[in-house]
Amino acid sequence: MQLEKDSEMNQFRENLAEVSMEPNSPPKVTIIIVNWNGYELTKACLESLKELQYSNFQTVLVDNGSVDGSGEKLKSEFPEIELLTSPDNIGFTGGNNLGIQWALDHSYDQVLLLNNDTLIEPDFLVPLVSFLEQNPDYGAVQPKIMFEAERDKLWNAGGGYFKVLEMTWSIGIGQLDEGQFDQEKDTPWITGCAILVKSAVIRQVGMLDNRFFAYYEDVEWSFRIKKSGFRLRYLPQSKIYHVAGGSSKKIKTKEGVIPPILHYYRTRNHLFLIRSHSNPVSFVLSLLYQTLKNAAFILYLGLKGRFQKVNAILKGHYEGLFSK
């Protein structure tokens, strides 16, 4: 079985090498942006992409069940984009998968998932594309991501991961950027905020898992890519800016700023991740940790009178354990 897998990987690398040897043929890149009632944020992102210093790309805007007419409005203002529409909100996973399928159907070489609440540096894409083209052992790469409102502060400099408890976090978040994360390195997972993936890798490992809808789907996809034998890379010489939470935060109510539905997805999907990618030891320890953590959080929210969030976490915990 291992020899067969090694043979497949060697053939994969040879195919990539043949493609990269074609003269004057920069890789074709699809940039996928999912919009859900986010006209202002998405417009700013698309305006930013007008300055992109890369010649061979197509922006695909997926309008994900918007009810504000933003998809058609953005298409009229940016006629160069490809507009795909879903009648319903099918989540971060479903929306991006529509765009990914379009990219695969149109034979694009690389696919970039880019949050609609981001702004780019004009030269950010070149080092990402070049790295993937020149390194067949790697399946995906990411840039350094800064907060848009405080551009000297980091939002993500790669993914942190503690296997024993199946814990993940964004490296450097909130830290002042003083060059401490200016060394490129491998990373255990890449945020879906900005991940560039080889199309050939997607064909091999599959698209985002639609069960997740939103949250932890990027971690799960990263783990699948790594399990298929590919590495992931953080490239700090590439930089973008993230509004962070622009599409999810609402007006503050008795339940707080973060809607209860987000607690449901985060709780459920973390357990989906544990069930899919843990080993026997980490499964037991991480499940125990998640149960204790959620119980403590439920107690805290109950004392605050935030019972919608209590119910969301309870539902998420149950479905994360028992739903297929």
Image (tube, rainbow, N blue to C red):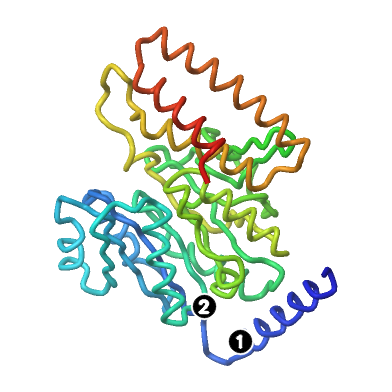
- Which quarter of the picture shows residue 273? top right
Cα distance between the residues tagged 1 and 2: 9 Å
Residue that appears at 35% across and 16% down: 306
The secondary element bearing badge 2 is classed as loop
Residue 77 left/right relative to 1? left
Picture layout, residue 23 above or below residue 51: below
Residue 271 shows which numbered tag? none
- Which residue is nearer to you in this view: 153 or 132? 132
Residue that appears at 55% across and 40% down: 177
Mark 1: amino acid: Val
Q: Dot 2, how many residues are within 10 Å of its Cα: few (below 14), some (14-19), or many (20+)?
A: many
- Which quarter of the picture shows residue 83? bottom left
- Which residue is nearer to you in this view: 89 or 246? 89
- Which quarter of the picture shows residue 74? bottom left
Which residue appears farthest toward the bottom when viewing the image? Answer: 23
Residue 208 left/right relative to 3? left
Question: Where in the figure is residue 261, as x and y percent of width and height?
Answer: 36, 33
Which quarter of the rendering shows the N terminus? bottom right
Mark 2: amino acid: Asp
Question: Where in the figure is residue 205, as x and y percent of width and height?
Answer: 60, 66
Residue that appears at 67% across and 66% down: 138
Question: Where in the figure is residue 71, as x and y percent of width and height?
Answer: 21, 60
Question: Where in the figure is residue 260, as x and y percent of width and height?
Answer: 36, 28
Residue 19 shows which numbered tag? 1
Residue that appears at 71% across and 36% down: 283
Residue 109 shows which numbered tag? 2
Which residue appears farthest toward the right when viewing the image? Answer: 3
Q: Dot 1, how many residues are within 10 Å of its Cα: few (below 14), some (14-19), or many (20+)?
A: some
- Which residue is nearer to you in this view: 235 or 177? 235
Say if mark 1 contacts mark 2, CB within 8 Å.
yes
Residue 113 left/right relative to 251? right
